[in-house]
Amino acid sequence: MLYHEIKDLMTLMKLPMEKWATNSLKLKDVIQTNKEYHKSTTTVLGIDWDTNDDTLGNAFKTSFCVAGDKPLTKRWLLSCIASCCDPIGLFSPFTIIGKILFQDTWILGIKWNELLPTN
């Protein structure tokens, strides 16, 4: 089985494979037989993956962009945009709004610590 070949090869190179995630029932049985680490839900490239249902989910934190007491500055806006991990573009229709706003700050000549205009 390819699993054993990969595991043996990586162990030979002193890079043992410890955490496996799969949606294959056959491979899950092998992993559990070897008493290795396996969860039904894991995060892959910032996206939640349920290996039982083979579905992708939302790994975004609901409060990733709450200013609280922080002033709304260009620096804060960039921090918000950068905190969104969306490597395969699932949330692009939403994240593009922040990127357009950030581009507008450059067009308007807003400095890094200057408060953002309300409009």
Image (cartoon, rainbow, N blue to C red):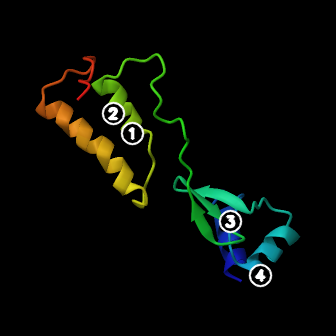
**Which comes before the other along the chain, label 3 or label 4?**
3
Residue at 81%, 75% in the rendered image = 30
Coordinates of residue 76 in the picture (x, y in percent): 36, 26
Identify the amino acid type marked 2.
Answer: Leu
Q: Position of 63 compared to 37: left or right?
A: left
Coordinates of residue 105 in the picture (x, y in percent): 20, 31
Q: Which residue is mark 1?
A: 82
Q: Secondary structure at mark 2?
A: helix
Residue at 75%, 77% in the rendered image = 27
Q: Nearer the viewer, mark 1 or mark 4?
A: 1
Q: Which residue is mark 3?
A: 21
**Mark 3 residue crowding within 10 angstroms, few (<14) / some (14–19) / many (20+):** some
**Disc 4 + disc 2, Cβ < 8 Å:** no
**Which comes before the other along the chain, label 2 or label 3?**
3
The quarter in which the N terminus is drawn is: bottom right
Residue lying at the far front of the rendered structure: 119
> Does residue 65 sit above or below 116 in this rendering?
below
> How far apart are the alpha carbons under marks 4 and 2?
45 Å
Identify the amino acid type marked 1.
Answer: Ala
**Disc 1 + disc 2, Cβ < 8 Å:** yes
As drawn, the label of residue 78 is 2
